[in-house]
Amino acid sequence: SKTRQEARVQPPYHAILGLEESQFRSLTKDAMWKAFYAQRVRYKRREPNGSLSEELQNPEDETDWNLVMEAFRVLSDQEARAEYEERNLAPHARLQLVGLRVMHEARCREEAEMRAKEAAAAAAAAEAGEQPV
């Protein structure tokens, strides 16, 4: 959504590696390695013996490859990943929680008003019962 895009501080690392961002909580190291290797195969030159060299297939892709490396470094380091998720993915969750908080606060107000009305009615009934008729 537009709000989510405005909230993003850093590049979408999950998308850069070809991972599903909505699955960020259940992402495993194995899945990250596979995604990273797929990107490596995409960008790096193959040697005649079949291994991947450190040279890029297209030197113009250096910026993209640097983003892949940055994404992998951030997502594979637990502390950096937690900070990234807090800054970039949590704002979207916070927006959802704002709505839940507003609903909860409204419900608490309604319940307090009902308790106040019940207490006032009980006090009026008690007062009416104490007065001689």
Image: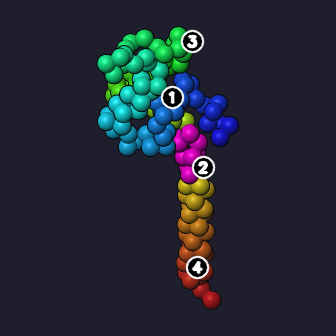
Question: Left or right: where does residue 1 sit relative to residue 90?
Answer: right
Q: Amino acid at mark 1?
A: Ile
- The relative height of residue 127 versus residue 113 in the rendered view (above or below) is below
Badge 1 element: helix
Give the Cα distance between marks 1 and 3: 17 Å
Q: Which residues are magenta?
A: 92-101
Give the Cα distance between marks 4 and 1: 69 Å
Q: Amino acid at mark 3?
A: Glu
- The relative height of residue 18 versus residue 80 in the rendered view (above or below) is below
The nearer-to-camera label among 4 and 3 is: 3
The image's mark for residue 16 is: 1
Residue 95 highlighted magenta (yes or no)? yes
Q: Residues within 10 Å of mark 4 (few under 14, many from 20)?
A: few
* Mark before the other along the chain sequence, 2 or 3: 3
Estimate the x, y position of residue 57 in percent, counting from the top left.
49, 16
Q: Which quadrant, please, contains the C terminus?
A: bottom right
The image's mark for residue 99 is: 2
Given residues 101 and 72, the one toward you in this image is 72
Color style of the picture: rainbow
